[in-house]
Image (cartoon, rainbow, N blue to C red):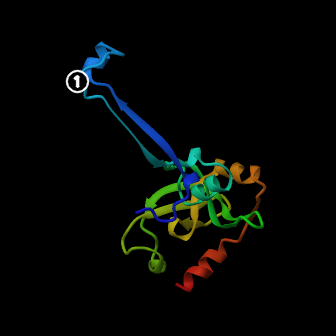
Amino acid sequence: MLVDYNPDDYKTVTTQHTCGFHKINPGKSWAGCTCSGSYGLVKKTTEELEGDKRLAAWAKGGLRMSKVGDRVVAIRDSNPETRILNIYGVGVYGGDEEPPAGLEGLFFGGMPNPKIELDGGGVVWGAQCWWGAESQLEDYREHGYKVVTVPLREVVEEDQDV
């Protein structure tokens, strides 16, 4: 069962399997032919989506995975109506580590979490934000979004309410 199905998010794919007889004798008929074909729907990759759909998929982590040391952006939220993207900042993906004591409410106990070391100082954990390649900020700007950096203290204050 498909949940939240939108036909624009899917593409049709076809497959063709040519039997041995027709590989050697194209265009001829044979009663023992085992040629087959099929078609179906598959979800488009994030790169195949356009406009706001691409941005939404990217914000959910739909684009390429980051490697330790890659430049990334930590996003608090975005609003497609006002075209504002609130970010905690840009920095470096430091790998997956176990978060420090005091943040247990956000994480599965003892489980590593993506660590984003911000250029402006401080650390944001993957469970506290959406995050991805810094280069994707240009996608937002090209679609008319204003990028606003919000103070890191907001993420700390929000986490204390958990």
Q: Position of residue 17 (x, y in %)?
A: 33, 29
Tell me what residue is drawn at x 45 percent, y 64 percent.
113
Q: In the picture, residue 23 is in which quadrant?
A: top left
Q: What is the crowding at mark 1: few (fewer than 14 residues within 10 Å), some, or many (at least 20)?
A: few
Tell me what residue is drawn at x 48 percent, y 76 percent.
106
**Foreground of the two, 50 or 29:** 29
Q: In the picture, residue 2 is in which quadrant?
A: bottom left
Q: Name the residue type under label 1.
A: Ala
Q: How many labels does the image show?
A: 1
**Foreground of the two, 91 or 131:** 131
Q: Relative to 37, does residue 54 appear above or below in the rendering?
A: below
Q: Name the residue under label 1.
A: 31
Q: In this view, does 101 lie to the left or right of 151?
A: left
**Foreground of the two, 123 or 25:** 25
Q: Position of residue 1 (x, y in %)?
A: 40, 63
Q: Which residue lies furthest to the left in this view?
A: 32
Q: Where is residue 128 in the image (x, y as percent from the top left)?
A: 55, 70
**Foreground of the two, 136 or 26:** 26
Q: Which residue lies furthest to the bottom in this view?
A: 161
Q: Is residue 14 left or right of residue 36?
A: right
Tell me what residue is drawn at x 27 percent, y 24 percent.
19
Q: Relative to 80, does residue 71 appear above or below in the rendering?
A: above
Say what secondary structure mark 1 lies in.
loop
Q: Relative to 106, does residue 33 appear above or below in the rendering?
A: above
Tell me what residue is drawn at x 75 percent, y 53 percent.
143
